[in-house]
Image (tube, grey):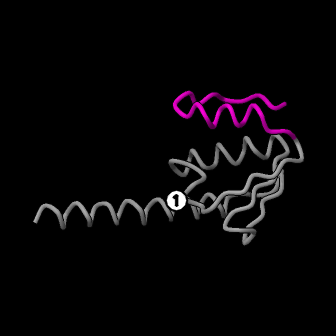
Amino acid sequence: MAASITRGQLVEREAFLQAVQAGDTLVIAAPFCIGLSEKDAAWFLGELSARGVAVIVNGDLVRLEPGADHSDMVRRVASALNVHHVRQAKRRAAKSK
């Protein structure tokens, strides 16, 4: 099993990383669900890849094999997070009027 840099704030995700095995496949509903930030998504996808875990995002629209370049997916995560933050800001602005 690959060595992990612990991210203690996300206890369930840490437990998941300890439980997965090479050859497993993780299905994720949307890029937004991969990480809390662009850096976090890159770390998580890297940890999965190092453990030999394939990742399917958006119902098999994207499949990341272990060792494959995941930089495009990290960019998608950053974009989804940006859209989310803009929506939140607009919602807060509308409430304050």
Q: Which residue is mark 1?
A: 78
Q: Is residue 10 above or below residue 85?
A: above
Q: Position of residue 79 (x, y in %)?
A: 50, 65
- Front one among 27 and 80: 27
Number of numbered discs on residues? 1
Q: Position of residue 71 (x, y in %)?
A: 67, 58
Give SS at disc 1.
helix
Left or right, 20 with respect to 73, comes to: right
Residue at the location (43% across, 62% down)?
82
Name the residue furthest right.
Answer: 23
| Picture quadrant of residue 50 | top right
Q: Position of residue 49 (x, y in %)?
A: 79, 46
The verdict on residue 86 being magenta is no
Q: Position of residue 31 (x, y in %)?
A: 60, 61
Residue at the location (41% across, 62% down)?
84
Q: Amino acid at mark 1?
A: Ala
Residue at the location (54% across, 59% down)?
32
Residue at the location (58% across, 64% down)?
76
The verdict on residue 9 being magenta is yes
Q: Is residue 67 above or below residue 76?
A: above
The part of the chain drawn in magenta is: 1-21
Left or right, 57 with respect to 84, comes to: right
Q: Is residue 43 above or below residue 71?
A: above
